[in-house]
Amino acid sequence: MRRVLGAFASVVMLAVLASASPAGAQTTRATITLLHGIPATPVDVEANGANVFTNFQFGQTQDLSSLSGQTLTNLRVKAAGTSTVAIDAGNVALPSSGNYTVLAHLDAAGTPKLAVFNNDVAKIEAGKGRLTVRHAAAAPAVDVRANGSVAFANLVNPNEAKA
């Protein structure tokens, strides 16, 4: 249980303080970040029949933005250095615009999954912030506490809450 909660605290509680692009700016491609959120499990990521990333470690990220608008065929996450498939995502069409985090994580039952989160990067007022909490630990629904009080109640894997 400690390991699950540690993984939850270190990876899943993502604070996103973001600001939008300057007014009138054009985005020519999507921002897509792949985040490895499965503890103690180095992996290789394969697409189009070849390894794209090898020995990808827990907590690391990869920028997939240059692939926006493309379809990755036979996207698979494998145990590092092996052909053992942990996640077989099939063909994945990457968006051509927007801001996303793709998270490799464990579902509530402990099965490896991919979750896609649309990151809110809308402009916020000066002096304000945005907090996004994502539950992607191998655990049932949780209450997320801040300063001793429940800030987000009954958060279910793989959902998120924002403030």
Image: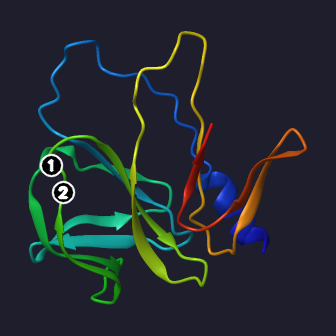
Q: Could you say which is closer to the camera, residue 54 or residue 21?
A: 21
Disc 2 is placed on an element classified as loop
**What residue did someone put label 2 on?**
94
Which quadrant is home to the N terminus? bottom right
Q: Residue furthest bottom?
A: 84
Q: Position of residue 82 (x, y in %)?
A: 31, 86
Sequence-wise, the earlier of marks 2 and 1 is: 1
Say which amino acid is labelled 2.
Answer: Leu
**What residue did someone put label 1 on?**
68
Q: Is residue 98 left or right of residue 56?
A: left
Disc 1 is placed on an element classified as loop
Q: Position of residue 163 (x, y in %)?
A: 63, 36
Q: Is residue 91 left or right of residue 87?
A: left
Q: Could you say which is closer to the camera, residue 102 or residue 97?
A: 97
Say which amino acid is labelled 1.
Answer: Ser
Q: Give me the residue at 42% from left, 37% from top.
A: 120
| Category of crowding for the residue at label 1, using alpha-carbon neighbours closer than 10 angstroms: few (below 14), some (14–19), many (at least 20) | some
Contact flag, marks 2 and 1 (Cβ < 8 Å): yes
Colouring convention used in this rendered image of the protein: rainbow
Q: Position of residue 141 (x, y in %)?
A: 70, 69
> Residue 91 falls in which quadrant of the image?
bottom left
Q: Give me the residue at 57% from left, 30% from top.
A: 130
